[in-house]
Image (cartoon, rainbow, N blue to C red):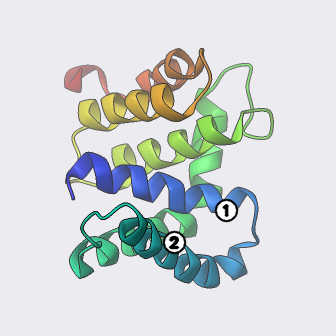
């Protein structure tokens, strides 16, 4: 899978947090990968590689572990908004991107922001990409822009 495809799967995985208790996420992970496997069979596409599944699972779980800290960071930067008022898709995208910006040294800030905007265009509402871009711009250090 490409990095973009992996990021999209991570987005889908962590989106489940909005509808399940964190304690249920291990079971949700199992269901998530079973669904990916069935989708591959139904669509006659390649099955997910073990290393891709491990990457998705590991990064998703790291993000889930830091949800409270991520939400606190987002709440500080998103003037006039709180994570409780944000749409679930936008919030999930922001959590993923903020995690990449703050905690993942392998992902450049610009890439994290660009990929988040692309996810917002694909999964969000009409205004989502602009909203996500505006919030994430506040996380970008001036020297990295």
Instruction: Tell me residue 55's x, y (percent).
Output: 30, 71
**Residue 63, position as x, y percentages in the image:** 49, 62
Q: Are marks 1 and 2 in contact (CB under 8 Å)?
A: no
Counting every numbered tag in the picture gives 2
Q: Mark 1 highlights which residue?
A: 17
**Residue at point 57%, 22% (across, down):** 128
Query: What residue is drawn where x is 64% and y is 61%?
Result: 16
Q: Please report the residue visible at 44 percent of the width from the left and 35 percent of the height from the top.
A: 119
Query: Which corner quadrant of the image does residue 64 belong to?
Result: bottom right
Q: Is residue 98 left or right of residue 91?
A: left
- Local packing at callout 1 (Cα closer than 10 Å; few below 14, some 14-19, many 20+) is some
Position in image of residue 70 (x %, y %): 56, 50
Picture layout, residue 135 above or below residue 126: below
Quarter occupied by the N terminus: bottom left
Residue 125 or 143: which is nearer the viewer?
125
Closer to the eye: label 1 or 2: 2
Upstream in the sequence, badge 1 or badge 2?
1
What element does badge 2 sit on? helix
Q: Secondary structure at mark 1?
A: helix
Question: From the viewer's perspective, is residue 72 above or below residue 22?
Answer: above
Q: Nearer the viewer, residue 129 or 32?
A: 32
The residue located at (25%, 81%) in the rendering is: 50
Residue 107 located left or right of residue 29: left
Quadrant (top left/top right/bottom left/bottom right) for the C terminus: top left
* Real-space CA distance between mark 1 and mark 2, rounded to the nearest whole angstrom: 17 Å
Is 78 positioned to the left or the right of 84 in the image?
Answer: left
Q: Which residue is mark 2?
A: 35
Pointer 2: residues within 10 angstroms few (<14), some, or many (20+)? Answer: few
Q: Nearer the viewer, residue 31 or 81?
A: 31
Residue 28, disc: none
Q: Residue furthest right?
A: 85
């Amino acid at each position: 899978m490409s990095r973009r495809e992996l990021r999209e799967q991570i987005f889908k995985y962590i989106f489940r947090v909005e509808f399940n208790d964190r304690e249920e996420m291990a079971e949700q992970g199992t269901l998530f990968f079973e669904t990916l496997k069935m989708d591959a069979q139904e669509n006659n596409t390649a099955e997910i590689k073990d290393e891709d599944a491990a990457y998705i699972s590991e990064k998703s779980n790291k993000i889930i572990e830091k949800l409270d800290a991520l939400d606190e960071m987002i709440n500080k930067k998103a003037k006039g908004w709180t994570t409780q008022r944000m749409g679930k898709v936008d919030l999930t995208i922001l959590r993923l991107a903020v995690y990449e910006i703050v905690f993942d040294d392998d992902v450049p800030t610009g890439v994290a922001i660009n990929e988040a905007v692309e996810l917002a265009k694909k999964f969000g509402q009409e205004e989502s990409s602009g909203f996500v871009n505006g919030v994430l711009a506040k996380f970008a250090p001036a020297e990295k822009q």
